[in-house]
Image (cartoon, rainbow, N blue to C red):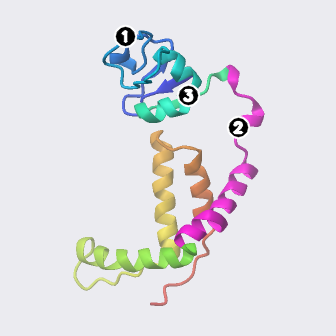
Amino acid sequence: MKFRNPKTGKVYDVKCNNCNESGFCADIECKNCPIETKTTRLCSDWVNANPHEAARLMGYEVIEDEEQKTDKDKPTRASILDEAKRCVCGQREQDYGKAEDNFSLIASLWEPYIRTRCVSDGADVCIMPEDVAMLMALLKIARICSGTGTQDSFVDLAGLCCMRRRDCRR
């Protein structure tokens, strides 16, 4: 298991024993270790047993070793679309309401901001819920392109891209 610091791009191996450099150490007596396992185990042992929690605590990303990956572990288009359907039509809809309603509200909040801050006086600004979806999709694309996107970024992107375009009628 390896970890990447998303700020620096540097990759660390759990075997690393300099916690000031990587955040993981092999010394039970280490006083500077940010992991603070509060056990008698070595930090590196705890990190190996809890890689995702360790990555979260350190602000790192988990990088699976190539030999640990199999084709069945890689997301497919179908699995991403299935997950997007579960998100868009499931818990998110329960938490936030229908996406169309939420995007309509966002559009109504963005319009006066853009009218005041981004265009010349008297310019007509009409933002539709579909525009909100596309702009948020571009946000997800930017994250993916910058290397900070996760599988969730692809799932969100798939969910955002299903909004139908209508003419501006306001």
The mark found on residue 50 in the picture is: 3
Badge nearest the viewer, 2 or 3 = 3
Residue identifier under label 2: 74
The Cα atoms of the two marked residues, 1 and 3, are separated by 20 Å
Residue 42 versus residue 54: which sits nearer the camera? Answer: 42
Q: Is residue 161 visible to us here?
A: no
Part of the protein shown in magenta: 67-96
The mark found on residue 6 in the picture is: none
Of pointers 2 and 3, the one earlier in the residue sequence? 3
Q: Amino acid at mark 1?
A: Glu
> Magenta: predominant secondary structure element?
helix
Q: Amino acid at mark 2?
A: Lys
Kindly indicate whether the residue at mark 3 contacts the one at mark 1 (C-beta within 8 angstroms): no
- In the image, taking residue 149 as reference, residue 89 lies left or right, namely right
The Cα atoms of the two marked residues, 2 and 1, are separated by 39 Å
Residue identifier under label 1: 29
Residue 123 versus residue 100: which sits nearer the camera? Answer: 100
Where does the image place residue 125, in percent across and percent down from the top left?
Answer: 36, 81
Badge nearest the viewer, 2 or 1 = 1
